[in-house]
């Protein structure tokens, strides 16, 4: 199922968005960003709830693959895509995310990058380390993957939040180690 979804996403990127040679990381980020959140799960939000609110988690990962939602999120929204050259250690790139007043809904940002393989026997397997954060209009810092600090073990990072605050959010990708 995942291979077929990736082929459809790659075809959509080429034919609908004009991305002639999308990177594997872009296809991966597109599909993960459009995954369906399974929370709270089949038993609801009560005491028997089995799926936590914050994605990713150890129960559902990033969610259930949903190609249609990845390519056509609904509500007039279109995925914003960035497939760019890399950053050097210490560099960062910022992306504005404007949320008009009266907006209701969730915002999902996904960062994915292809990482070089680690040396055999290496304790830490991630060679490069990019971090995704979002600064809200009120100054609150949102971190990826439900963490309270930087994520230095994953090459996919997601931040998902309710767009309950109008204004300019700033998504930031920082290269901690490249």
Image (spheres, rainbow, N blue to C red):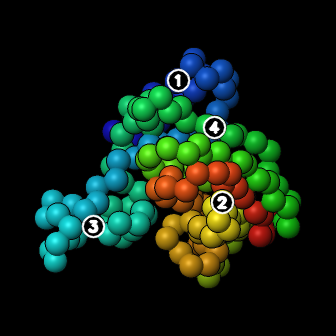
> Residue 94: image x %, image y %?
76, 53
8 shown above or below 129:
above
- According to the image, label 2 marks what residue? 137
Circles 4 and 2 in contact, beta carbons < 8 Å? no
Q: Is residue 138 left or right of residue 160?
A: right
On the image, which quarter does residue 27 sit in?
top right
Nearer the observer, disc 3 or disc 1? 3
Q: Is residue 46 left or right of residue 17?
A: left
Secondary structure type for disc 1: helix
Crowding around mark 1 (Cα neighbors within 10 Å: few <14, some 14 to 19, many 20+) is some
Secondary structure type for disc 3: loop
In this view, the residue in front, 2 or 166, is: 166
Nearer the observer, disc 1 or disc 2? 2
> Residue 78: image x %, image y %?
53, 32
Give the residue drawn at x 44%, y 46%: 104
Regarding residue 133, the answer to whether it shows in the image is no
- For marks 3 and 2, the one nearer the N-term is 3
Crowding around mark 2 (Cα neighbors within 10 Å: few <14, some 14 to 19, many 20+) is some
The mark found on residue 11 in the picture is 1
Q: CA distance from mark 3 to mark 2?
A: 29 Å
Q: CA distance from mark 4 to mark 3?
A: 29 Å
Q: CA distance from mark 1 to mark 4?
A: 15 Å
In this view, the residue in front, 57 or 164, is: 164
Give the residue drawn at x 49%, y 70%: 146
- According to the image, label 4 marks what residue? 81
Crowding around mark 3 (Cα neighbors within 10 Å: few <14, some 14 to 19, many 20+) is many
Find the residue positioned furthest to the top. 15
The mark found on residue 51 in the picture is 3
Give the residue drawn at x 55%, y 56%: 165
Q: CA distance from mark 4 to mark 2?
A: 22 Å
Q: Is residue 15 left or right of residue 137?
A: left
The mark found on residue 74 in the picture is none
């Amino acid at each position: 199922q995942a291979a077929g979804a990736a082929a459809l996403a790659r075809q959509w990127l080429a034919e609908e968005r004009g991305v002639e040679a999308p990177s594997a990381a872009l296809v991966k980020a597109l599909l993960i960003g459009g995954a369906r959140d399974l929370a709270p799960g089949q038993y609801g939000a009560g005491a028997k709830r089995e799926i936590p609110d914050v994605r990713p988690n150890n129960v559902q990962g990033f969610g259930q693959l949903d190609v249609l939602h990845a390519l056509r999120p609904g509500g007039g929204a279109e995925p914003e895509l960035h497939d760019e050259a890399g950053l050097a250690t210490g560099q960062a790139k910022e992306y504005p995310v404007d949320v008009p007043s009266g907006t209701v809904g969730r915002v999902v940002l996904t960062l994915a990058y292809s990482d070089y393989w680690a040396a055999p026997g290496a304790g830490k397997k991630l060679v490069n380390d990019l971090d995704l954060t979002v600064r809200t209009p009120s100054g609150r810092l949102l971190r990826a993957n439900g963490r309270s600090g930087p994520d230095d073990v994953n090459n996919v990072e997601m931040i998902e939040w309710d767009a309950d605050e109008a204004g300019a959010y700033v998504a930031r990708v920082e290269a901690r180690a490249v």
